[in-house]
Amino acid sequence: MVAPIDAKETLRKVKRLLDESNQIVEQIDSLKTEKNELRPLCGSLRRRSIRCGKDNCQCKRGRLHGPYHYFEPSKFRGKWQYVSKDDLESVERGIADWKKQLDIDERIKTLSERLDEIRREMTALIPQY
Ligand SMILES: [Zn+2]
């Protein structure tokens, strides 16, 4: 038999855990919304000066063309894609979004772990019949 004072204390604890879990669920929801608005590009930008290959060109004597920008996808290392000046800003934004996405995923993971913990704590608090 649980004494009334303990029951009150247990109730308070359960309420606190419920409040916290509701807050966490809200945080996860808003992080997911934030994540949906991202346009992530998974990779990195590289700068490179090149030789065009023409015989009579200055680059043959060491004055290379560029530097030009290339995008290197994380999944296909070495497959560099040329990025024009017009596209540079959006590629940079995409890479920034990708980093933001990684950060959001990490935060969601931490929050979900806390949710599991709360569920275990609540199960331990609520009497089993
Ligand atoms: Zn050249």
Image (cartoon, grey):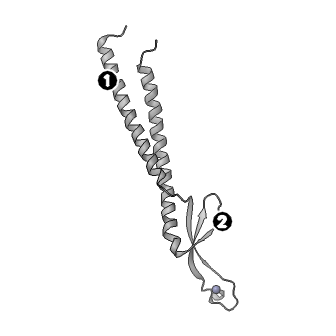
Q: Is residue 127 above or below residue 21?
A: above
Helix, strand or loop under label 2: loop
Location of residue 83 by image quarter: bottom right
Label 1 CA crowd tier, 10 Å (few <14, some 14–19, many 20+)? few
Query: Which residue is more in the foreground, 3 or 59?
Result: 3
Write the residue at 48% across / 60% down: 96
How far from the left and from the top, in percent, is residue 33? Answer: 44, 48
How far from the left and from the top, in percent, is residue 67? Answer: 56, 78
Measure the alpha-carbon separation of dots 1 and 2: 58 Å
Q: As drawn, is 70 to the left or to the right of 54?
A: left
How far from the left and from the top, in percent, is residue 101? Answer: 49, 52
Write the residue at 30% across / 12% down: 4
What residue would you read off at disc 1? 12
Q: Quadrant of the N terminus?
A: top left
Q: Amino acid at mark 2?
A: Lys
Numbered label attached to residue 92: none
Q: Amino acid at mark 1?
A: Arg
